[in-house]
Image (tube, helix red, strand yellow):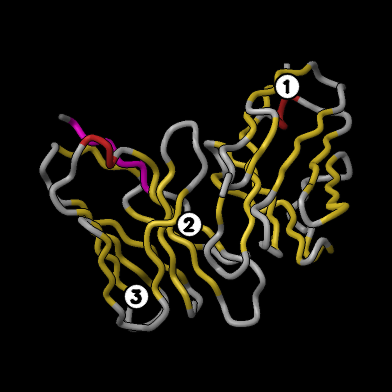
Amino acid sequence: DAGVIQSPRHEVTEMGQEVTLRCKPISGHNSLFWYRQTMMRGLELLIYFNNNVPIDDSGMPEDRFSAKMPNASFSTLKIQPSEPRDSAVYFCASSRLLGYTFGSGTRLTVV
Amino acid sequence: GQQLNQSPQSMFIQEGEDVSMNCTSSSIFNTWLWYKQEPGEGPVLLIALYKAGELTSNGRLTAQFGITRKDSFLNISASIPSDVGIYFCAGHQTGANNLFFGTGTRLTVIP
């Protein structure tokens, strides 16, 4: 079991650029979650999917953020255009029941 | 979303000391979980509690599900330097698809 795999681990981009974060959940897990972590706000749930269907995206900050899950083994979180305040660590987690397994995160820096 | 408050926010303790932290909510949860996040990694599940009053141990860790179902406690005995990290509580409510995470307790162990 390779765990939840996120890429890239680090991303530095210029303001206004498009950023795409990727996640491969654990095989057999039917729920996938995207979180953002900052010092000020802690862990924030952005969006989650059940069986590849978005269930709750009320945590997505604004229209610049979008997430897709085209199949059970892949999800993306896209920010377009990116802004400095988007700088944070973005985590993907997957679960079959309640015990989430988190990836190692993508540290995004927008300059 | 639901607010889970953790205290203390941070702790600095001497190696070998015992640690206590707690998590409280104004809402009832039917499952409590405790996670640990080490620097540069995602949170990892430590303990899950499923019944009010339940006391569960995992090595030097002991967690309790509060009788009111609105709180939970985590104790670490004889702390060691590798206990350093951020500890998150998380709660699940019946009918919900996702977990609600606490604000975190940052633990520093001084050798």
Give the secondary structure at mark 3.
strand
The spot of residue A97 in percent (x, y) is 59, 70
Q: Chain of mark 1?
A: A
For disc 3, the neighbor class at 10 Å (few under 14, some 14 to 19, many from 20) is: many
Residue at image x 65%, y 47%?
A92
Query: What secondary structure is marked by label 1?
Result: strand
Q: Using the image as rendered, state which of residue B28 and residue A7 is in the foreground.
A: A7
The N terminus of chain B lies in which quarter of the figure? bottom right
CA gap, disc 3 to disc 2?
A: 15 Å
Three-letter code for the amino acid on which mark 1 is drawn: Val
Quarter-of-image position of residue A103: top right
Q: Earlier in the sequence, mark 3 or mark 2?
A: 3
By secondary structure, the bulk of the magenta-drawn segment is best described as strand
Q: Are marks 3 and 2 on the same chain?
A: yes
**Residue in the picture at 66% in, 62% down:** A29
Residue range corresponding to the magenta coloring: B105-110
Chain at tag 2: B
Write down the quadrant of residue A24 in the picture.
top right
Is A42 situated left or right of A60 in this image?
left
Q: CA distance from mark 1 to mark 2?
A: 27 Å
- Of badges 3 and 2, the one in the foreground is 3
Give the labeled residue for mark 1: A110
**B111 shown above or below B37:** above
**Residue ID for mark 2:** B102
Alpha carbon separation for disc pair 1 and 3: 41 Å
Image-based side of B109 in relation to A104, left or right: left
Amino acid carrying mark 3 in the image: Phe
Residue B65's disc is 3
> Is disc 1 surrounded by few (<14), some (14 to 19) or many (20+) residues within 10 Å?
some
| Same subunit, tags 1 and 3 | no
